[in-house]
Amino acid sequence: MTILRDTPIDGPEFRPLRERVEAEAYVASVCFKHGPPRLTGVELEWTVHYADDPQRQLNAEVLRQALGDHAPRTLRSDSPQISLPGGSPLTAEPGGQVEISAQPEDSLTTLYATVTADTGYLTGLLAAHGLVLGTSAIDPYRTPQRILTVPRYAAMEKAFAPLGTDGITMMCSTAGFQVCVDAGERQDHAARWTAAHVLGPPLSALFANSPQVLGRRTGWVSNRLRAVLGTDPVRTYPSDINGDPATNWARRVLETPLLCVRRDDGCWDAPPGVTFADWVIGRADLGRPATIADLEYHISTLFPPVRAHGYLEIRYIDAQEGDRWLAPAALLVALLSKANEVIDICMPVADRWLTAARDGLRDPALARIAARVAELGIGELGSTGLTPDLAQRVTSDIERRLQDWRDEA
């Protein structure tokens, strides 16, 4: 999740929006920047546990002490928020999950070195206070419990509660792995957007890593993805695929109901069913006009499998154990360089999101497509900036996952 940064209240981002067309044009232009695909960034989340008792509920004060001056202000209001030594900012999720957002690099080898160093440093901070990083993409032991008390998360919890328990689970018990890539040249936006989406079901199946909840296997291979998709479908379902992703995304952003509204009084609850478009055109009175800053913040409250935010944020892969995140990151980067081939291969299973979360590679069609895209991506690893040794490590990891599935079949 994206956390609001401190910004001056008199900047151009606080200019009022008066027309829906103006807001849509802004989203389309800002969220789909164009240029050659060059940079890759990653965001890694982990649940946090007591080393001697992983079932024990996390204490916010212990986590604050462990993170020290690296703690985000959502956890410690006076924190200087010092980045980790490799430059990665550290944030925290509502249930105390921690996340590092590595600065984008033009080489996966450089990115891997940075993430490895920062992860090791973070592990040391936590270990000094008896804490460890989780190895699954969903807390396999504890019931969801929010430990961050900031207004954003209070409003989110209240908004999701009438829809069931998936919202609080998503907020407080899940850990995702996100790959951030350039949208590409304008003429390639549609192909890269489509490829990023249709890869979702087979890659979610291939890298599923959250089979256990509350101490038992549920039968779903990715309980994290199941919870995310069930949280609030209007903001978590996959976007439509068409030839004009920028326009389509802008419309979706404007038509999505507000999740929270920033206010000075500490209550950020949004009126139910009011969309951002309603706010812009004055159909709803929220006490002040909507601004560019509000629009950018609203985008951060959409959690689809692929989110456009100046780049493509690919959000559907489970958090991985240790440094195994490199395999899905490298595979995605390699495959997006072959977008049209990917689309042809994956389109038959493009809508099998819940099947991927439930059955993973037990589904014959997903298994077949995952094997095909794995073969295609492995053949393109040379374009990712990986050293031969790292490329071989990625290849071995992917082949091992596929072999494990075949052995179970």
Image (cartoon, rainbow, N blue to C red):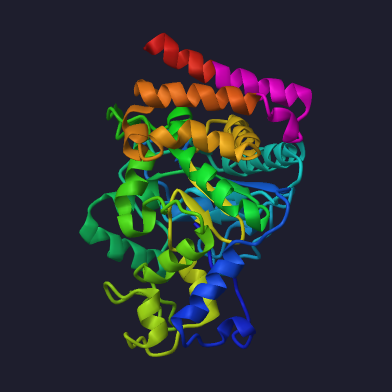
Looking at the image, residue 211 lies above or below residue 272: above
Looking at the image, residue 235 lies above or below residue 365: below
Instruction: Please state the horizontal and vertical placement of residue 149, each as a whole percent of the image.
Output: 41, 65
Q: Which residues make up the magenta segment?
A: 379-399
Give the residue displayed 58% in from the left and 39% down from the top. Answer: 340
Give the residue displayed 58% in from the left and 63% down from the top. Answer: 31
Residue 371 visible, this orientation: yes
Q: Is residue 280 magenta?
A: no
Q: Is residue 163 left or right of residue 289?
A: left
Q: Give the camera-side residue of 192 and 362.
A: 192
Please identify the quarter of the rendering in which residue 377 is found: top right
Instruction: Please state the horizontal and vertical placement of residue 326, each as a whole percent of the image.
Output: 63, 33
Q: Give the camera-side residue of 260 and 87.
A: 260
Label count reads: 0
Q: Is residue 387 magenta?
A: yes
Outermost residue on the top side: it is: 407
Residue 2 visible, this orientation: no
| Quadrant placement of the C terminus | top left
